[in-house]
Amino acid sequence: MRPQDHPQQPLLLNRGEEEEEEEEEDEQETAYDSDEKVHIIGIDADSDSDNAPPFSWRKLWLFTGPGFLMSIAFLDPGNLEGDLQAGAIAGYSLLWLLLWATAMGLLVQLLAARLGVATGRHLAELCREEYPSWARMVLWIMAELALIGADIQEVIGSAIAIKILSNGVLPLWAGVIITACDCFIFLFLENYGVRKLEAVFAVLIATMALSFAWMFGDAKPNGMELLLGIVVPKLSSKTIQQAVGVVGCIIMPHNVFLHSALVQSRDVDHTKKGRVKEALRYYSIESTVALIVSFIINLFVTTVFAKGFYGTELANNIGLVNAGQYLQEKYGGGFFPILYIWGIGLLAAGQSSTITGTYAGQFIMGGFLNLRLKKWLRALITRSCAIIPTMIVALVFDTSEDTLDVLNEWLNVLQSIQIPFALIPLLCLVSKEQIMGTFKIGTVLKMVSWLVAALVMLINGYLLIDFFSHEVNGVIFATVVCIFTGAYVAFIIYLVSRGITFASWCYPPKNVEGIE
């Protein structure tokens, strides 16, 4: 599908208008070129119908892929660290929150997929077109900072896994270099087609599932306590920090941009409502299955550490770097040492998340700046932004293990700050008839989505207040923080107010009903 001059009305343009605009369209940045997309077989006779064709397992298989790539952000090393700390400190008591946080994440990702499918454009491209230059640049910078923060955590996690699996022969900085190079090797597979690359991610997710399921089997957690942890909400003042971490790790700003672009890897005729409805149906099923799998994997990690370390003196000292060693001491070697099982799962999580991070960086940079650069060049720029600070961190961390804990706190805060700058534009765009046509979200879904977004932002706001109340010392530092906080809140208010009116002056309203 070629991008439109007015992508906000993908179902209203006729073929003649498409042909007239073809030259200018070719100059626009796109997530995927037409020859890169997966062709969906099975064109029904009634191809102009507004209704989706009957369900087909074969078509579901062809649409399967983008949701699983998106789900990797729910399984990155930062999430794994949040899981193990929640399990060690709070036991099974936060499993219910993990379930509901995953459900909230699913809602956000389904909205991102809806935006990409219905408009034929991804979130970064639409932000470029709908916001003035200064706001667009602020949003781009925020998205890049969020991506760099996530990337550092992912690369460090992968480097720790390499250090574990090499018995300490390879230092952390060497693992960082290997991870950076591996990323380009995997991206090279894209030249053989989107499906081949998706198959690599499927192997990595399966590796994580197998590794952590093996650990789960070795730990033999209490089934009744596990079930009660999932169905009975429980929260105490002692576990509030871990609860905030569980929710904060689920919504990743760069993942919202990523998913809205990944869904365009399938060849969907956006001029036919039936085809768009069909794509949305299959992507909804696929994304739901993918996040169920990610929830189960996160549950495995949380329960393993809950069974082994909850209520012990070690609970507050466990992190990514020493988790494997503590597991080894607790559960022993067995048929295959649990230290290496943990290392393999962590490596799969780190490698897969760094690749999707690079993917997201390409879409964010290309969408906001409308760059027609080669993908490898955009990948090189994106990776360099993260690898250089990560190398510095790796060299420092090799001499001080406490550095990683401090680093993770700052990186979590950095990503929490960015969440409104992905969620608010997304919700404003999918609510607008001028952008989505007949596929705008209805009143009920809009209310639920804004409530979820407000809840996520409030929870992360608590994290920010708690963090800075302990970290801010001195008049100068406090003044700087207050200035940035004022600017931050003002920009959020601008985005919300802009969302109420920004599209109404561009396009006349249309008499079509929204879909709930």
Image (cartoon, rainbow, N blue to C red):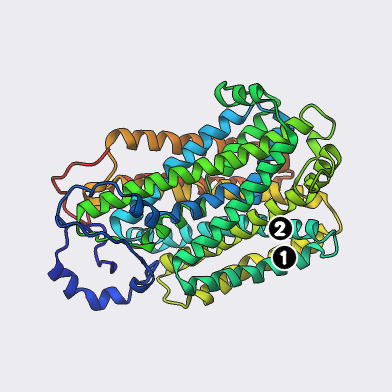
Q: Position of residue 335 (x, y in %)?
A: 80, 46
Q: Which residue is mark 1?
A: 176
- The answer to whether any part of residue 322 appears in the image is yes
In the rendered view, does 378 fall on the left or right side of 428?
Answer: right
Identify which residue is drawn at 61% across, 47% down. Answer: 209
Identify which residue is drawn at 26% across, 49% down. Answer: 277
Closest to the observer, 239 or 296: 296
Q: Which mark is residue 156?
A: 2
Please determine whether, in this image, residue 317 is positioned above or below residue 2.
above
Identify which residue is drawn at 25% across, 47% down. Answer: 439
Closest to the observer, 443 or 469: 443
- The answer to whether any part of residue 132 appears in the image is no
Q: Position of residue 354 (x, y in %)?
A: 60, 60
Label 2 neighbour load within 10 Å: few <14, some 14-19, many 20+? many
Mark 1 vs 2, N-terminal side: 2
What's the residue type where badge 2 is placed? Ile
Quadrant location of the C terminus?
A: top left
Rounded to the nearest angstrom, the CA distance separating label 1 from label 2 is: 7 Å
Q: Decide: marks 1, 2 in contact (CB < 8 A)?
A: yes
Quadrant location of the N terminus?
A: bottom left
Please determine whether, in this image, residue 140 is positioned above or below residue 314.
below
What's the residue type where badge 1 is placed? Val
- Secondary structure beneath label 2: helix
Q: Position of residue 147 (x, y in %)?
A: 56, 58
Q: Position of residue 114 (x, y in %)?
A: 34, 49
In the rendered view, does 494 fall on the left or right side of 15?
Answer: right
In the rendered view, does 294 fall on the left or right side of 91?
Answer: left
